Image (cartoon, helix red, strand yellow):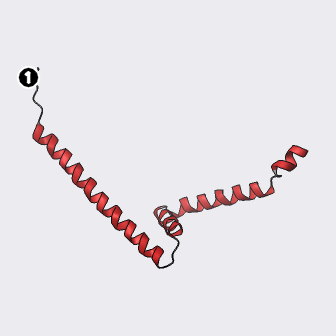
Amino acid sequence: MSDVTIPGGRIRSFVERVENIDSELQELNEQKKEVFSEAKGEGFDVKILKEIIKLRKQDQDERDERESLLDLYMRAMETAPAEKEAKAA
């Protein structure tokens, strides 16, 4: 073996810190599930709530760009001939 010493205490410290964070994240995810379950119980659509949360994380410019692209793609798709029509031509 080499004479290099590995700071085991420091490694343990990092590992335990990450394990604690993982535990906290698991608890927070459980709380989030409970909130969504409560909202669903009151008749709210959880998918829509998640979409709102996703949109609120974006800045206004990102949202505007996304909505513009979505509108552009939808209009392009609606004006394109259907596959059956394109094959017949």
Q: Identify which residue, 62 or 35, lies in the foreground.
A: 35
Q: Which corner quadrant of the image does residue 8 belong to?
A: top left
Q: Secondary structure at mark 1?
A: loop
Q: Is residue 62 left or right of residue 6?
A: right
Q: Residue beneath label 1, please?
A: 3
Quadrant housing the C terminus: top right
Check disc 1 and give the amino acid type. Asp
Q: Position of residue 76 (x, y in %)?
A: 75, 55
Quadrant housing the N terminus: top left
Q: Is residue 51 left or right of residue 36?
A: right
Q: Position of residue 12 (x, y in %)?
A: 15, 43
Q: Identify which residue, 10 or 43, lies in the foreground.
A: 43
Q: Residue at x 37, y 66 (%)?
A: 32
Q: Name, please, the residue furthest toward the right.
A: 89
Residue 75 drawn above or below residue 45: above
Q: Residue at x 31, y 58 (%)?
A: 26
Q: Position of residue 14 (x, y in %)?
A: 19, 45
Q: Residue at x 49, y 62 (%)?
A: 54
Residue 49 drawn above or below residue 89: below
Q: How many marks?
A: 1
Q: Name, please, the residue furthest toward the front.
A: 41
Q: Which corner quadrant of the image does residue 28 belong to?
A: bottom left
Q: Identify which residue, 34 or 63, lies in the foreground.
A: 34
Residue 1 drawn above or below residue 30: above
Could you classify mark 1 by the number of other residues whose Cα lies within 10 Å: few (under 14), some (14-19), or many (20 or more)?
A: few
Q: Name, please, the residue furthest toward the bottom.
A: 42
